[in-house]
Amino acid sequence: MATEQPTYKVFDGHNDVLLSLRLKERGAGRSFFERSDTGHIDLPRAREGGLRGGFFAIFTPNPDPSDSFAGGFTQTENGYEVRLPQPLEQPYALQFTVGMLASLFRLAAESAGQLRIIRTADELDACLAEGTASDGPLAVVAHIEGAEAIDPALDALYVLHAAGLRSLGPVWSRPNAFGHGVQFKFPATPDTGPGLTDAGRALVRACNQLGVMFDLAHITEQGFWDVASLSDAPLVVTHTAAHALSPFTRNLTDKQLDAVRESDGVVGVIFGVGNVRADGRHEINTPLDDIVRHAAYIADRVGIDHIALGSDFDGAAIPQALGDVTGLPRLLTALQAHGFDDDAMRKLTHANWQRVLRQTWK
Ligand code: ZN
């Protein structure tokens, strides 16, 4: 495939490169600083694709493989469903999380300034202002996907925040002490279970107070509305798509999209084929146009100030036409061809995330 020069600096809503570097089955052993054919992101490929940073997820997998997406998968008459994984033990999740956070700090230390852990909006703006799309430092925001590492008294939250945590998704798609993750199911509404627990409500308030971004990807619809009625920060969903186009439980309904817009929040458009295909199938033979359709629909619904990118690189199967992070310029060209002008592209690729983080962090 022809390589296109990256034009826009991309700050992206979600990737799982830290997990990909750690787990044997995902390609552990490769170096973040050397070009590889494994996974979707490393530094040379990020540069080639114009990825200048984003939310780097710390995710704790279930220890039992039968509790994975593949392990719980059942085909249904017109789609599929995945059994909810067992809850994690908090000490296990905390230990795993500390290890992942340490791996991020080690990468930053080895990077000679090429990878920077971002803790403030000024640091983010300054980092992204340096260099071009393909040669500046990476702006990395530490994000936890699923708050199992945090005890109900929230002691670990304060320590993790002091260590650099600036974004937290209360749940992944499994239950925990704070709430209920949305079950993977297609076709189905996101209303798959209860919302926040009392501890979950305390977590929202503490994150508001500390200035930790609260990510509503993977939460049940009830949990989404619980947070919407409680939080004083803009509503944020880092990696998702439009339920109206692809009726997957992980995607947002029109009413949820409206709530994000009204809160001055942001929706990161995911590239995962299971989210963007109208038939919900996990096939990488999926045109870039499926991502463009979701971006156009969401931009129409929420307005150009409330849409961003949330790739799920190294976490989801993405279209073969994208391949890995080096395919980003092809996707951006397709978005421009669809009618996103220069101002819209600037907002979508990074400026909206910068605005929302400035409003959210303190
Ligand atoms: Zn996710």
Image: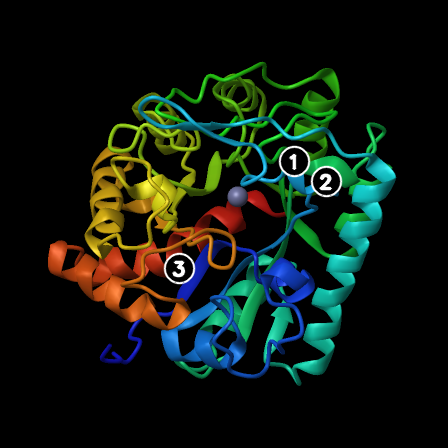
* Above or below 309: residue 133: below
| Number of other residues with Cα within 10 Å of mark 3, as a class: few under 14, some 14 to 19, many 20 or more | many
Q: Secondary structure at mark 1?
A: helix
How far apart are labels 1 and 2 at the CA level?
Answer: 6 Å
Q: Residue at x 63, y 19 (%)?
A: 196
Q: Residue at x 50, y 69 (%)?
A: 41
* Above or below 317: residue 203: above
Q: Quadrant of residue 263?
A: top left
> What percent of the width, then of the height, locates residue 233?
54, 34
User: Are the residues tagged 1 and 2 within 8 Å (C-beta)?
Assistant: yes
Q: Which residue is mark 3?
A: 350
Q: Does the closest atom of ligand 1 sit within 8 Å of the Cβ of label 3?
A: no
Q: In the rendered structure, which amino acid carries the disc numbered 2?
A: Asp
> What percent of the width, then of the height, locates residue 295?
26, 46
Q: Give the numbered dot on residue 64.
A: 2
Q: In the rendered structure, which amino acid carries the disc numbered 1?
A: Asp
Q: In the rendered structure, which amino acid carries the disc numbered 3?
A: His
* Above or below 329: residue 313: above
Please indicate, yes or no, whether residue 222 appears anywhere in the rendered image.
yes
Q: Give the numbered dot on residue 38.
A: none
Mark in front: 3 vs 2: 2
Q: Which residue is mark 1?
A: 67
Q: Residue at x 59, y 61 (%)?
A: 26
